Image (spheres, rainbow, N blue to C red):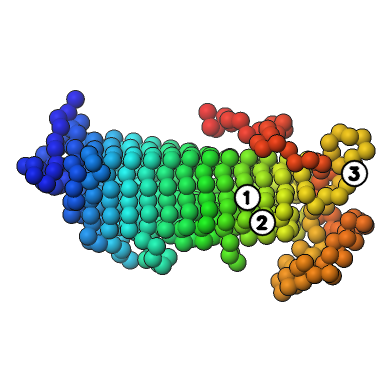
Amino acid sequence: MGGVLEVCPTCPLRTLELALARATSGDTIVVGPGHYPQTHAVITVPVTILGKGRPLLDGGSQGTIITVRCGNVHLHGMKFANTGYSSLEEYAAIRLENAPGCRIGEVETENCAFGIACYHSPGSIIENATCRGTGAVESLSGNGVHLWKSPGCRIERCSVSYHRDGLYFEFSSGCRIEGNESSHNMRYGLHFMFSDSNIYRSNAFHHNGAGVAVMYSRYVRMENNAFTDNWGPSSYGLLLKDISGSIVCGNVFEQNTVGIYMEGSDNTSVASNTFRSNGWAVKILGSSVGVLLARNTFIANTFDVLSNATRSSVRCWENYWDHYRGYDLDRDGYGDIPYRPVSLFSILIERVPSAILLLRSFIVELLTYMERAIPSIIPPTIEDERPQMKAPSPMVQVTMPELNCRRSRRER
């Protein structure tokens, strides 16, 4: 058990730096209520710093406020503001450098370039944090929670907004991101690359400039998340680029320009998701192979699926399509004729974007009627041989082993 050091405006220790100069391993520093001008404080021994009455550490636009350079440091119950911005350094409210096993909880960062940045700090935990960025232009802003070569971290119940990217991870595998909200960020609500075996569960990503981007990663699980209100010419609910062996299951994609955009992805399952009121629910490029669309629900999308992939590269199975007009004579709950979700008009728009002006016109309505009357004229790019006649209940578990949302061996 270490000692307890108190910091307050009337205490002998009036600044955090004075307390850190006296602290030894295992000590607890209690920072009382007040406003503390503070920049470039460095923690080099494992201590616990507790805020009492939500003290404010103000960087005065002079740089990083706290830098942690040792493991097992705990920060709890404080507010950080005003780091300023530098084109040469990544100013952050809290910066971890080679600091494994740290824990940051119940903190707020406001008007900071980077909120919480972790470099070479595996096994760290960030929970119940609120990061609100500068809202400045993208070139003058950083990320809310930033992981670099920090595997095995947990990000839970955090709220991130008005940063460049809300959550950004690179070379950080085996992480768990759960119960967070990321919104109104200039670029991506979540952006990660080269980060394998990560789990993203029960998060909400909405009103971000370009949605969510998952790139160059394997064995990713995205479950029970909400991707909503991401609109723009280059905006997606979820962008999957060059990923493999991954599962996207039980999510909601609502009111996005494109719900899911897949490029160069292989052996990826998209199952038990709900696509509602998107421009395009799913776009799959021909460079994606081994893709499975199963037991998803497509409701009120302008276009359900667009793909230039071949039938051998995309399997489509037991989805519900509100545009389907087939019949079920044997009453087994599935349509007796297959459904081809790639419409002629969606292909035309992809080749001639200005044709979107014809949407809702008589010509397009006539073309849609012809597709329903003569399904053979629809391109056989993707075909669902067992379309569901009724929308399934939310979060129906898929029975196929590769689609089950239950915990996998990697998660255990």
Q: Residue type at mark 3?
A: Tyr
The mark found on residue 253 in the picture is 1
Alpha carbon distance from label 2 to label 1: 8 Å
Image coordinates of residue 398 in percent, x first then y, are: 70, 34
Mark 2 lies on residue: 278
Q: Nearer the viewer, residue 405 or 204?
A: 204
Mark 3 secondary-structure assignment: loop
Image coordinates of residue 224 in percent, x first then y, are: 58, 40
**Are discs 2 and 1 less than 8 Å apart at CB?**
yes
**Are discs 3 and 1 less than 8 Å apart at CB?**
no
276 vs 178: above or below: below
Q: Is residue 164 left or right of residue 383?
A: left
| Residue shown at the point (83%, 52%) measured from the top left | 340
The mark found on residue 327 in the picture is 3
| Residue shown at the point (37%, 47%) measured from the top left | 130
Q: Residue type at mark 2?
A: Asn
Looking at the image, the residue that sits furthest to the left is 12
60 vs 337: above or below: below
**Are discs 3 and 2 less than 8 Å apart at CB?**
no
Q: Nearer the viewer, residue 375 or 122?
A: 375
